């Protein structure tokens, strides 16, 4: 049964009560989401109305321009064939914008459609220290512009615990102008900026373009005392134009990564791993040429 009212759409469903807590999975199709037309507003309404629940997306391609998460939620797909497909105009806006709450995103494909400059953007606007997990996802086809590079996943000014695990990030790029130092063509698979606690583990990062700075993972933070637990481990890097990993920070651990060297078709890569900082641990990484 459906009722229309609060936030434009309210669905009634049967929940399971366990330990006094409502455990409920909400199927977006039951709330009127389809594969035809822009579904952004309806999906945002579902997220806002179902704090603490799991929002399930069945197999299909859902056209969106920017999904915003402002509360505790789990966004779950049926696997790689469940796609949030960016359908807006060319923009630096993210496909998925995580602003607030304990959030898990799993078993979804985030597709920028070569129009969105950011696949997933995570920023703890309230400095509240949430727990955010991205797992078993695909982030692909992200394309930046001349003022902002393409970022598969960007974690910015964040005090939360962020875990990015078992996720494929591929085909990240943007325009090039051949001029060094102006940041046009600076693209990243994962960009970690002023974060406190992050783990990137078991991910594959493939085809990150950009002669200015095409990096698989960049971690930037100079106030090392606030970098409590930054771990980059057991990841696979292929076809990265400049560096697999770039660290401009202190107190990071980079271990057990595999880096393949068949990256840049035009000139030799700058480095497999670049470190600018103190007290970083680099251990048991394998560079395969």
Image (cartoon, rainbow, N blue to C red):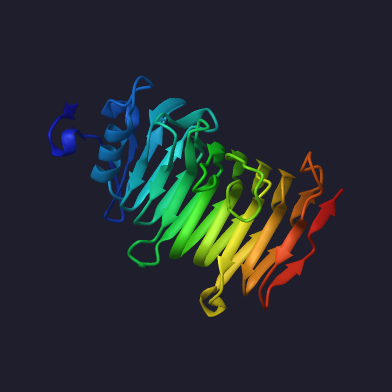
Q: Residue furthest left?
A: 5
Quadrant where the image shows the N terminus: top left
Q: Residue furthest right?
A: 289
Which residue is located at x 38 percent, y 32 percent? 64
* Horizontal side of residue 260 vs 19, given as left or right: right
Which residue is located at x 56 percent, y 74 percent? 222
* Depth check, front residue: 22 or 54: 54
* Depth check, front residue: 216 or 72: 216
Which residue is located at x 51 percent, y 38 percent? 107
Which residue is located at x 54 percent, y 38 percent? 143
* Horizontal side of residue 233 vs 107, given as left or right: right
Report x, y in % for residue 191.
56, 55
Residue 234 visible at all: no
Residue 90 visible at all: yes
* Horizontal side of residue 119 vs 46, given as left or right: right
* Horizontal side of residue 233 vs 197, given as left or right: right
Report x, y in % for residue 265.
79, 39
Report x, y in % for residue 146.
52, 44
Vertical side of 45 occupied by 17: above or below: below
Report x, y in % for residue 212.
65, 50
* Depth check, front residue: 57 or 230: 230
* Depth check, front residue: 174 or 29: 174
Q: Residue furthest front?
A: 179
């Amino acid at each position: 049964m459906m009722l229309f009212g609060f936030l434009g759409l309210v669905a009634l469903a049967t929940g399971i009560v366990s330990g006094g807590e409502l455990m409920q999975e909400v199927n977006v199709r039951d709330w009127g989401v389809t594969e035809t037309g822009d579904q952004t507003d309806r999906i945002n309404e579902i997220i806002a109305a179902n704090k603490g629940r799991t929002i399930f997306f069945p197999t299909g391609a859902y056209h969106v321009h920017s999904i915003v998460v402002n509360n505790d939620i789990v966004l779950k797909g049926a696997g790689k064939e469940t796609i949030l497909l960016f359908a807006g105009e060319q923009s630096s806006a993210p496909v998925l914008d995580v602003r607030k709450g304990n959030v898990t995103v799993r078993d979804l494909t985030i597709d920028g459609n070569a129009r969105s400059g950011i696949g997933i953007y995570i920023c703890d606007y309230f400095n509240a220290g949430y727990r955010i997990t991205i797992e078993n996802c695909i982030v692909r086809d992200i394309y930046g512009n001349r003022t902002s590079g393409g970022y598969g996943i960007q974690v910015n000014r964040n005090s939360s615990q962020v875990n990015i695990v078992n996720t494929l990030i591929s085909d990240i790029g943007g325009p090039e102008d051949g001029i060094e130092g102006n940041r046009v063509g600076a693209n990243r698979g994962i960009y970690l900026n002023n974060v406190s606690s992050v783990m990137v583990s078991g991910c594959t990062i493939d085809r990150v373009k950009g002669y200015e700075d095409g990096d698989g993972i960049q971690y930037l933070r100079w106030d090392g005392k606030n970098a409590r637990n930054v771990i980059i481990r057991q990841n696979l890097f292929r076809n990265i134009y400049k560096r697999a990993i770039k660290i401009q920070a202190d107190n990071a651990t980079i271990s057990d990564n595999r880096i393949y060297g068949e990256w840049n078709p035009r000139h030799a890569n700058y480095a497999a791993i670049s470190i600018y900082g103190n007290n970083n641990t680099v251990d048991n990484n394998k560079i395969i040429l």
